[in-house]
Image: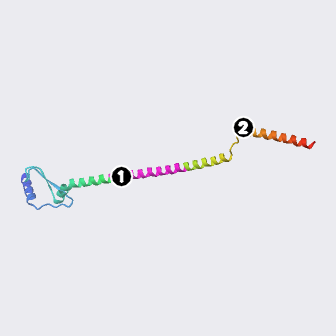
Amino acid sequence: MLSKVAQILSVTLVLCNTAMAGDGRFTLVPSGGSVPFQATCFDDIATAKLLTWREFQETEFENRLRFELDLQSEKYTLELESLEIKLNETIFRYDQKILLRDKEIESLRTIIKKDRKVNLPLAIAGSVVAGIAIGVGTAYAIDKAFQ
């Protein structure tokens, strides 16, 4: 009796119109049914989803890959721009320090030019000669004054 009911259900499944499911459902056909093996019947939506699943996955993975590559590219671009800003700042600071050093060197040179040290041996010799001349001049003036 159970076998007759299964046969009737199998025949009605084969003879019935195509089942339409809104969410892409599938139905199992038992091995004693109208097909000699266990089969799965899909509606049009489920079949379409199965047929396009590989293309969908490829597209999805390409989109993910493109997103990740763009994200990584933006990350490295940001890091590169940050390093360029740091480099420019360092160059600017270096140039400012060099300018400050050059100004300080120039001011020290001006101070040195103004404050030239006198040649010591020449100053001593000049002082001795001037002292002798003053002494001789004073002695001459005193000698003339008493005559």
Whole-percent x, y for residue 140 in the image: 87, 41
What residue is rendered at 74% in x and 40% in y? 123
For the residues labelled 2 and 1, say whether their Cβ atoms are less than 8 Å apart: no
Q: Within the image, what quadrant is residue 19 found in?
A: bottom left
- Name the residue at 44% across, 51% down: 84
Question: Mark 1 is on which residue type?
Answer: Ser
**Is 69 part of what is drawn in magenta?**
yes
Q: Is residue 144 left or right of residue 30?
A: right
Pinpoint residue 67: horizontal percent, then vertical percent. 32, 54
Q: Is residue 71 magenta?
A: yes
Residue that label 2 marks: 121
Amino acid type shown at disc 2: Pro
Residue 111 picture location, percent across and down: 66, 47
Question: Which residue has dot 1 on it?
Answer: 73
Query: Disc 2 vs disc 1: which is toward the camera?
Result: 2
What residue span does the magenta drawing correspond to? 68-96
Instruction: Tell me if 61 is positioned left or right of 92 in this view.
Output: left
